[in-house]
Amino acid sequence: MITIYCEKITPRVKYTFHLVFEAILGLDYELMSDEAIYLSSDEAKFTYGIGPIDEGIFVRASGLLFESDIIDQSLEVGELDGIPAFYRVDQPSFLEYDLFSAIFYLVSRYEEYLPHIEDGHGRYQASQSIAFQNGFLGSPIVDRWAQLIGRLLMEKFPTLAIASRSFHYLNTIDIDNAYAYAGKGGLRNVGGMAKSALRLDKNDLSKRLNVLGGKAKDPYDTYSYMQEQAAKYNTAVKSFVLLGDYGPYDKNLPHSSAEQIRAIQHMAAFSEVGMHPSYGSAGDLGQVKKEMSRLSGILGRSIRISRQHYLKLKMPNTYRILIECGVEEDHSMGYSEVLGFRAGTCTPFKFYDLEAETSTDLIVYPFAVMDRTLNDYLKLNPDEAIQHLHQLVKEVRAVGGTLISVWHNESLSDALEWKGWLPVYEQLQACGIEEG
């Protein structure tokens, strides 16, 4: 147990200290503003604020956690104990940097509320982030900072009981397009055949005709393979199904088609199935509710997990819509174009609504790697991709965190641009049971 004195206990202070001491360190703590009680205690303790109140441990605050507005931050990244750090304090302090402010800045996604340049899909870009610009996006820096705080406090108070964390792996699957050919209907298949003919793509035309004629398996029908891999490695799986209306970026099967329902039911046999709000639903509460109702009707239960299609995440509006829909977990926190930790952490955390200055019950599960990032954006071959995965696993293992990956059913087809990628997927599944 450690007692923390803070003269001004704001929602930001409560949120950050809960994340550090309970969620990451697993340490019992008491946060108080009663100076007399704090001074009378002879247990492990420290003060956090603008100035010390006794001769004990004092962590100087930069001021961010005491504010209630959103303003541009002047940040300079330095180093603390060999780890990148920012919010340096110039006066005497137990920590040379206010790591609590740095943690809040990253996990609240403070920088995403500030003016920034969006990509063509209206998304916040990794290149805008302090982590990318200073070379630590590939490290779960928040977890490393929290563990550094815990280690330094244990040196002062050896009786502190900090929990030991174990590495976990969570496999997540997006079903943007349940089948390549099956269930598309006559019009879409005729159009597909016409395109193949114009491109002189005899291979695609032959595959389509064989699948539709019942002579071959649809290349996107990789559900049995995913189920076998989950059983082989005892992997936790969560999947997200696109059930939006047809559009330029939403091209799944009709939500009522037998093939779509069959794919969903197959995924439900070995994973928790959640919704994948469509590209066209972004910012539209009514459309998200409609798509959620479609999935709920197929599964016969309420829907509690979600991930945005195309990762169309806008702070705080997207999360407010999900909360209104009763979603408990979101899995959109990551980048399309690069690997790494968008919120600086590999620990699931509560969404903090910075505009409303309140912590919510929506749990954000940050992912670190996506198949399309490896293949489409970084242009890696399978062997290179595996090396990148080994580094991510090493980073997350070092802090006992949770590594979350994003894959797609079509990426497991072992065809076209995904030829030779099955070993990459299988390496990921194995990482949950391998040591080192």
Image (spheres, rainbow, N blue to C red):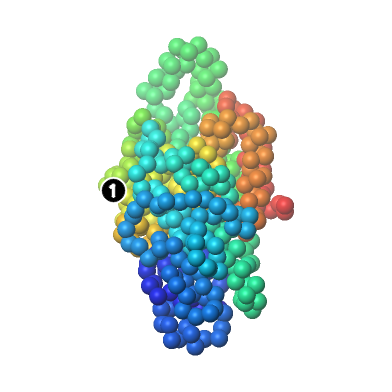
For the point 63% across and 30% down, the residue is 381
Which one is nearer the viewer's eye here, 393 or 220?
A: 393
For the point 52% across and 15% down, the residue is 201
Instruction: Please identify the residue farthest to the left as the structure is shown.
Output: 286
Which one is nearer the viewer's eye here, 344 or 227?
A: 344
Q: Residue under circle 1?
A: 285
Residue 336, image x and y in percent?
A: 48, 39
Report if residue 238 is visible in the image: no
Residue 155 vertical placement versus 306 (above, below): below
Question: Which quadrant is the N terminus positioned in?
Answer: bottom right
Residue 2 vertical placement versus 399 (above, below): below
For the point 52% across and 61% down, the residue is 97
Residue 112, image x and y in percent?
A: 39, 48
Looking at the rendering, which quadrant does residue 104 occupy? bottom left
Report if residue 111 is visible in the image: yes
Instruction: Please identify the residue farthest to the front as the structure is shown.
Output: 91
Residue 93, image x and y in percent?
A: 53, 68
For the point 59% across and 43% down, the residue is 226
Q: For the image shown, how many numbered marks are present on the structure?
A: 1
Please give left or right for residue 371 compared with residue 124 in the image. Answer: right
Residue 300, image x and y in percent?
A: 40, 53
Label 1 amino acid?
Answer: Leu
SS under mark 1: helix
Please give left or right for residue 24 compared with residue 315 in the image. Answer: right
Which one is nearer the viewer's eye here, 327 or 36?
A: 36
Residue 105 vertical placement versus 65 (above, below): above
Residue 25 vertical placement versus 34 (above, below): above
Disc 1: CA contacts within 10 A as few (<14), some (14-19) or many (>=20)? some
